[in-house]
Amino acid sequence: MDIVCVGSGNVATHLTKAFRVKGARIVQVYSPDISNANLLAKEIDALAISDLAELSQVADLYLIAVKDDAIATIAHKLNVVKGIVVHTSGATPMSVLADAGIQNYGVFYPLQTFSKSRDLNFSNVPLCLEAGNAEVLNRLKSLAETLSPLVYEIDGEKRRILHLSAVFASNFVNHLYHLGGEILAEHQIAFELLRPLILETAEKVQTRLPFDVQTGPAVRDDQETMKSHVSLLENRPDLQEIYKFLSKSIKKTHS
Amino acid sequence: MDIVCVGSGNVATHLTKAFRVKGARIVQVYSPDISNANLLAKEIDALAISDLAELSQVADLYLIAVKDDAIATIAHKLNVVKGIVVHTSGATPMSVLADAGIQNYGVFYPLQTFSKSRDLNFSNVPLCLEAGNAEVLNRLKSLAETLSPLVYEIDGEKRRILHLSAVFASNFVNHLYHLGGEILAEHQIAFELLRPLILETAEKVQTRLPFDVQTGPAVRDDQETMKSHVSLLENRPDLQEIYKFLSKSIKKTHS
């Protein structure tokens, strides 16, 4: 299987590396910035290109892993190829590919958070697929199953919902880790102390539902402690508001 | 070492089990509800009691692991013992023990989230200690080091700060997992799909700082996606508010 990767960011990097390990050949990596294309291309024995006119027309799969607002433009350059064209975006409908006149199209959305400098084991990454027709879907399924046993057929509406819920369960969560660390830093306490707690909190919900393992002053309706916490935050009105808001939401959920 | 445990909740259960594995003897478990005391006592070969007048006067350590607002009352029943009396609360000052007239007192605060039905490995739990004098502190340190290499001397003010930051990094985080799951449930999608993402988000910050690995529409200032997410939440104004508030906080942090 010959793959062309359009994009050189986190998703492009992790997906192409994983496909390559499974025996695919990455023939080209495109980025408008040739040095970015080169960085990834070197790692996966591909050719770096920075001009869309140079895109191979004969690859089996075209992976569009670029910023959401660039997908449509890229798609219009790919409406002559015979291979399957997929984007990897949670928030973008598949129709942008159809509308560009692409023949064989689909979506290959890995529900995970990617950082370039951290290796990722795909065998635990849910891969959410959508395709323009049954044949493309089957080919994408076969391909996805080489990477992970967690392969799901998810339409565009559900994909948007997954993407939104991931903002709550990952992006916002990471920000709360940061805010916890900020509170410590103001008192010269190292972030390190929070790490075991953070890990255990995530591990707990691997086998249970978060509703069933909620702890803390809000779920106990421990007014005394909540009042004391809010007053400890008196020089951080922004954190006071987040504290009150999320405590109220916990109480509402568990009342 | 003979230990009396006052309380039979999550912290009492995990701590006494861990001490027992390390060779301590748990002589009594107190709970006002004898059936609760019995449940734990059976597991750790202790005597269950429900009357504070029956408390052994000759134990080496008295572990007060009860709700914060019950600590002072319990402490007043323990001011005749020679052994060390500690509470395990992040939010309670050590002075409640001194004020009760206890001679040898301290705090033994494990910075972790405990669930009864989940086993916990203490070797990764930060144990935060405070004591009324150097001799008690040394004895608590020796004891703590049998459970975990992560032993810290933390005064009452810093302990309150740790407790507060744990609310952000654990209690609020768990609630965001729940909200992510609620969004999925409204569209008949299983919580399961979020689990790998949740775990990876926590594992990422075991070696990095959350500031450096923040992802998502807010840190990219991707207005388009944020607008679309808010409109997806139109029947959940409470979640819209949380979405806007946390997104604003992320933007502020990274601007």
Image: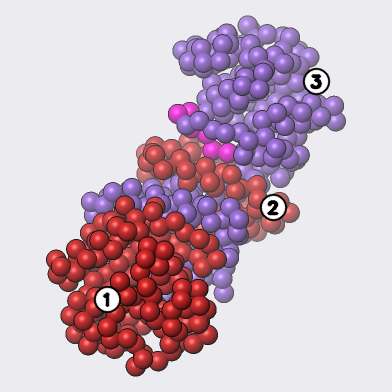
Chain colours: A red, B purple
Q: Is residue B148 above or below residue B235?
A: above
Locate residue A46: give its quadrant: bottom left
Q: Which residue is mark 1?
A: A60
Q: Nearer the viewer, residue A15 or B114?
A: A15
Expressed as whole percent of the image width and height from the top left, the position of residue B93 reads 70, 35
Q: Nearer the viewer, residue B147 or A24?
A: A24
Amino acid type, mark 3 = Gln
* Residue at 61% from the left image edge and 48% from the top image edge: A194
Instruction: Say whether mark 3 and mark 1 are on the same chain.
Output: no
Quarter location, residue A207: top left
Q: What is the three-letter code of the residue carrying label 2?
A: Ala
Q: CA distance from mark 2 to mark 1?
A: 50 Å
The mark lying in front, picked from 2 and 1, is: 1
Q: Residue furthest top?
A: B54
Magenta-drawn segment: B111-117
The answer to whether residue B152 is left or right of residue B226 is right
